[in-house]
Amino acid sequence: MRCGMKSNKKRKTLFVAVLMFLFLSLLAGCGGKKTEEAGTERPEYIYVPEYFNLGSSDYIGSAINYENEIFYYTEAWDDETGKSRTGISKYNFESRKSEMISLDVGEASVSAMQITPDGKIALLIYEWTNTEDENGEYQDGSGSYALWYMDPESGEITGQKELSEENGVAKDAYLGSFYIDAQGNNYLFNSNEPCIYVLSGDLQMVAAISLSDYINQMFASKDGEIYVTLYGNTGTEIRKIDLTKKALSDPLKFDKELMNINGCMTGISCDFLVNDQNTVYAADVTAGTFTKLFDWLDADVNGNNVNYFGELPDGRIWVITSTYDGNNNEAELLLLEKKKSSEVAQKEEVTLGTLWLDDNVKSAIIDFNKSSDKYHISVKTYGQDDWESGLTQFNADVASGSGPDLVDFSNLNYTLYAEKGVFEDLYPYMEKSGLKKENYVENVLEAYEMDGKLYGFTTEFSIYTIVGKQSVLGELSGWTLSEMMDFIDQHKDSEVFPYASQQYMLYLLVYNNMDEFIDWESGKCSFDGPEFARILEYTKTLPEQYNDDTEEEGEATKLRNNKLLLLMQSVSSVEECQMLEGMMGENPVYVGYPNKDREGNLISAVGGCLAISSKSGNKEAAWAFLQTLLTEDYQNSLVDGFGWSGFPILKSALELQFEKDMTPEYYTDENGEQVEQPKTTWGYGNDFEIDIYAAKQEDIDQVRGLIASAKKRQNNVDEELINIISEETEPFFKGQKSASDVSNVIQNRIQVYVNENR
């Protein structure tokens, strides 16, 4: 289905690769380079937003600016006709008027738009044609491309040129990115090969540049040179298309290494603008510099929602964002104007420190900053160069009292920080604001309590668990580590967990159960006991790396056939439980992770995890923001049409989510009868798919029970602990040391670390 077309079904797939990515990220201590460490001092200049609503549309496919106007292509589904409505709109920033340009493309669509050197708008048109056999049955269709040229003033189509094999364009080409250089040459990226076609203004082949990999984006500099971004060994690379050599240049060198470039747009005051989702930079190719212009959050923009942006002749930045609430896509046009900070109304600054910021929290900060005439939340993201240095700086700031007012501990060991007394107890603040504990999912709040005090909370949650078939697990509702190891020993002829490698199972059995081996309150460690030695002996029998190249069956198929027994799962919706039951063909049993209390269904934060620093000088201001996340309005906003993002912590919002899950959806058949239709479609891997209909009461009851069973919190593990265990187990896995020797070394090293960090 072509992007932008509305469907009655939305497919949701749980890719096991995602679980592996999360696992590897945890082993790396969530390593890698992170977003820029933003200062908390207000800069001399800031970019002030002005908003223009573009209305509801399913799809904004392309946007460009020409002088003081922007042109953007939209598609919106028309339920009455069963077709997409297409059009091109233009907005003039001088007159502040918008105008819809009538565009009849029939069954085709506009893939991209660009400005030609003579001021025309070039439209890359794509049309898919179905063919029928003699019985009227659809056969394989074919796609075709053309370039249409439109007068920007009148909207008149002044010319049309087909793109075909006669131009050197492959018959099966799939053309995405499209740009025009200063000489009028057309650059078209064919993702099917992959290669870049360069055609002259009259569409004669100039070059066909073969690529070894896909590009992320193609864009033009202010001088009309064409560049591409692609993933390389050090992150996202920028390369110039060299027509002389008919090849890509070497990666351009800049003074700042950006791991994630989310978009580049033609500049006017610079060569081009660069967006890394957090910050916008002005690029100077000759000088090799990225100069920071602004952070999106400081301009009250969620960088993750930015579709298109650019620079007007007077230096203002235009931005098109879109947000999807599960039902509708809402587009917004913003104009950012550079002003002196002294010219803008001053607010009390509240800083929020984070290693990585959840998208919902970003949106909440933006909403708060827009609505508050008293406070402004500034975000300080630690760790530009690497995670470890950012964490070190964060710890130093928090300990010294010079750190942020608000702390996002999503990627931190909450227990370690809370026991040090660095967070405020939030219950007195809740009581003062009239927020009652009993109105929230109490076991979720209690999971963040220490000695009856609430030092932080998550806005929404999932249940992190181990799940299997009832015919395999029986009536088990939990197990100890020893009991789980017994289960593994009893099923040596079966694959107990997917992707079972040495480090993967250490994560499952040790890293995810670190509290079984470390008592942070007393400081006692127990890595020299029999349980840890048993884990070592078991993991030694596993491969160093799991090789899935030889897999003939997917996880779902193996699970149904009892060739695979258990899954690690993060359950974040009723729909997901329905999917698991359908995949297993019987009732799933959520036995959970092993621990001494047999309470292994763990509360896992989905939204941000936030706390107030006990040394903050702006505690009331910090609470003013936090309490908005606990309100009915915000919690209800988490009840969405996606059905998978997580459970809200407010009981009434959770009930609203359950009500939505149980509400059937219908379509009208050819006889005018209402017929229930799937709410969505879920898949697991590449070998299972199921239509999800409205949940039954027993489905809701099962999820209620699962949530109620979760008494403990999934804790993030200190990177240093992972490093110690990984380093010391390596010689054991290689047969160079015994389990006893390794256990004693790990015990001693971790005991020292715990003593130093309690």
Image (tube, helix red, strand yellow):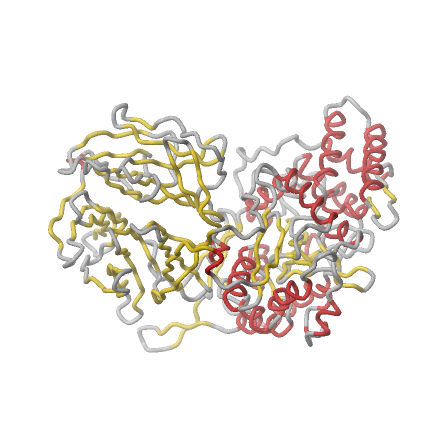
Residue 674 appears in which quarter of the rendering?
bottom left
Q: Position of residue 234 (x, y in %)?
A: 50, 31
Residue 672 appears in which quarter of the rendering?
bottom left
- Residue 91, above or below 191: below
Determine whether, in the image, residue 148 is placed left or right of residue 376.
Answer: left
Q: Residue at x 26, y 41 (%)?
A: 179
Q: Position of residue 114 (x, y in %)?
A: 24, 47
Q: Is residue 28 visible?
A: yes
Task: Determine the residue located farthest toward the left in the rendered image.
Answer: 158
Q: Residue at x 58, y 48 (%)?
A: 381
Q: Is residue 468 visible?
A: no
Question: Which of 379/264 is in front?
Answer: 379
Q: Position of residue 162 (x, y in %)?
A: 15, 44
Question: Which of 739/519 is in front?
Answer: 519
- Residue 74, above or below 674: above
- Residue 197, above or below 417: above
Q: Position of residue 738 (x, y in %)?
A: 82, 26
Q: Tell me the quarter of the image containing the N terminus.
A: bottom left
Q: Residue at x 86, y 36 (%)?
A: 528
Question: Which of 235/25 is in front?
Answer: 235
**For the image shown, how many numbered marks are present on the structure?**
0
Residue 618 appears in which quarter of the rendering?
bottom right
Determine whether, in the image, residue 477 is placed left or right of residue 119.
Answer: right
Task: Determine the residue located farthest toward the front in the rendered image.
Answer: 342
- Residue 538, above or below 273: above
Q: Residue at x 82, y 41 (%)?
A: 754
